[in-house]
Amino acid sequence: MKSKALVALALFLSTAYLHAPRQDVHAEDVEAKSYPVLSGVGIALTLKDGHLIAFKLLPNSPADESGLIKEGSRLVSVKVDGKTLSMNGKSVSEAASLIRGPVGTNVVLTLVAPDDDAETKVTLVRNALEIAGVPDSTYKAFIGKPIPNFQLSSLDGSAKKNLSDYQGKIVVLDFWASWCPTCYAPVAKMQKMCEDNPQWAGKVELVTVTVDSELSKAVEVIKQQKWYRTHNLAVEVDELKAIGVTVVPVIIIIAPNGTIATMAGAHALDTEKEVAALLAK
């Protein structure tokens, strides 16, 4: 995999784009349920003088339609899961990972407008956001179909593993990269899922899959972040062409029969809820 093939999109919260051929999508293959590539509130952030600034609002996004957020506003705090977190000292990627989340869930932002010292709290409902060239239908076309048997490898490159080796289990694949900081939060959540769900042992495999060309960089991030509860593997970008993965972070959940149960942007998906639903069947 050549580094030229990878481009990070800073706009709309740092989704990373992999240049791969687009899969043809047929109308009859598209299910009604939406699994977006990217979900959030439509604020593009930048760091200026040590502060996080909302430098652009995506037209028709929740942030834009609220009418309460001005471009140039300073982001003071983000409230998620009942916790209010100060954005002081946070990076763009850290803030983006907090703001993004499953469609239909709430996030509360506290901002200061560029022409006003008063703080304003805005409650926004996350929604699907568009990424140019990567339509939601690309993902929908794969849901309910058998997962292609592409090959994964160990992080030292010494061993190969076929996806079919996991047949009979629920498999969660989280595709990420060391150069994609917004990929880190979903992988961290996978670690917590392992810890919180010991009853999944033998039934569910949680696998992180780096698309890094230099695996040593992925290994270094894993050591720094202490991601040791998941199975950490790697994949060549060419292997992803067959399943339409063109951005990271992306999560694919595979049912025990080998079909794709869910495929979505990692921040757009409640992985734990989806796995629990499969286990209940």
Image: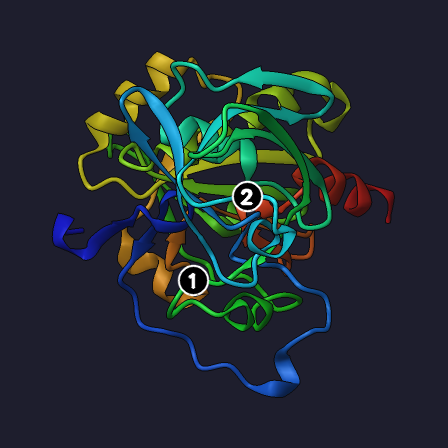
Determine the secondary structure under disc 2.
loop
Quick check: 236 left or right of 145?
Answer: left
Give how far apart the Cα atoms at labels 1 and 2 are. Answer: 22 Å
Q: Tag on residue 131?
A: 1
Task: Report the mark closest to the observer, 1 or 2.
Answer: 2
> What amino acid type should be assigned to the residue bearing mark 1?
Ile
Could you say where residue 104 lies in the image, as x and y percent from the top left? 73, 49
Placement of 96 over or under 228, stated as above or below: below
Placement of 17 over or under 197, stated as above or below: below
Residue occupying the point 56% across, 63% down = 60
Placement of 31 over or under 256, stated as above or below: below
Depth check: give the residue in front, 122 or 203: 122
Could you say where residue 248 lies in the image, as x and y percent from the top left? 40, 47
Could you say where residue 122 lies in the image, as x and y percent from the top left? 66, 36
The residue that label 2 is drawn on is 69
Check disc 1: other Cα within 10 Å, few if <14, some if 14-19, many if 20+: some
Determine the secondary structure under disc 1.
loop
